[in-house]
Image (cartoon, helix red, strand yellow):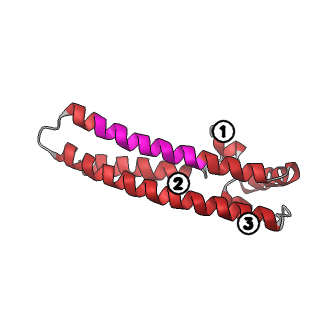
């Protein structure tokens, strides 16, 4: 039981963190977008402007607030899930409904991550994107 809960927790939280950081051929999101960390670590190399920096910071701050709220909600729903599956005879319909609630929150998290990555990419010029693509290739 603990292993199942651990796997579910890793799945819910781990995917949220890894979602934006993966960069493999099988990951179209990792290939198409630039993580905030990559942009921040290479500001000089890509000639990141002050207005771009300010806009990116605002986007990140807004997203972080939303992520925090969604993670709290997800944790609350996971606690309910644990109680349901921890009973001697869980009711399948209740377990399924609770799982749907958790997956809906995870889906919101992923959509917000893609929105953030899209907004960051849209702040970058063609030349900046090309430089970041090169930097990503060098790191891999």
Q: Which residue is mark 1?
A: 28
Position of residue 41 measured from the top left corner of the image (x, y, whole percent): 73, 66
Q: First in sequence: mark 2 or mark 1?
A: 2
Which residue is rendered at x = 55% and y = 61% of the image? Answer: 64
Q: Which residue is mark 3?
A: 54
The residue sitting at 60% across, 50% down in the picture is: 20
Q: CA distance from mark 2 to mark 1?
A: 16 Å
Is residue 37 something one can see in this rendering? Answer: no
Magenta stretch, main secondary structure class:
helix
Which numbered dot is residue 14? none
Q: State the residue at coordinates (48%, 41%).
A: 107
Secondary structure found at label 1: helix
Residue 17 got which mark?
2
Q: Is residue 100 left or right of residue 129?
A: left
Q: Tell whether label 2 touches label 3 (CB within 8 Å).
A: no
Where residue 108 sits: x, y (%)?
49, 44
The outermost residue toward the left is: 88
Q: Please report the residue visible at 45 percent of the width from the left and 45 percent of the height from the top.
A: 106
| Residue 64, above or below 1 | below
Give the Cα distance between marks 3 and 1: 27 Å
Left or right, residue 1 beside residue 37 = left
**Dot 3, crowdedness within 10 Å: few (<14), some or many (≥20)?**
few
Does residue 138 appear in the picture of this structure? yes
Whether the magenta-drawn stretch holds residue 107 is answered as: yes
Residue 21 rendering spot, x and y as whole percentages: 61, 52
C-alpha distance separating marks 3 and 2:
23 Å
Q: Which residues are magenta?
A: 97-113
- Indicate the secondary structure of the residue bearing disc 3: helix
Percent x, y of residue 71: 43, 56
């Amino acid at each position: 039981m603990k292993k199942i809960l651990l796997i579910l927790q890793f799945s819910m939280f781990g995917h949220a963190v890894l979602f934006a950081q993966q960069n493999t051929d099988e990951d179209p999101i990792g290939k198409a977008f630039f993580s905030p960390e990559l942009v921040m670590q290479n500001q000089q190399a890509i000639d990141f402007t002050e207005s771009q920096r300010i806009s990116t910071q605002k986007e990140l701050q807004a997203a972080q607030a939303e992520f925090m709220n969604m993670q709290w909600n997800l944790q609350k729903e996971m606690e309910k899930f644990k109680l349901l599956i921890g009973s001697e005879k869980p009711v399948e319909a209740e377990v399924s409904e609770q799982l749907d609630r958790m997956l809906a929150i995870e889906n919101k998290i992923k959509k917000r991550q893609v929105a953030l990555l899209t907004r960051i990419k849209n702040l970058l010029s063609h030349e900046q994107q090309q430089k970041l693509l090169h930097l990503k290739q060098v790191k891999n």
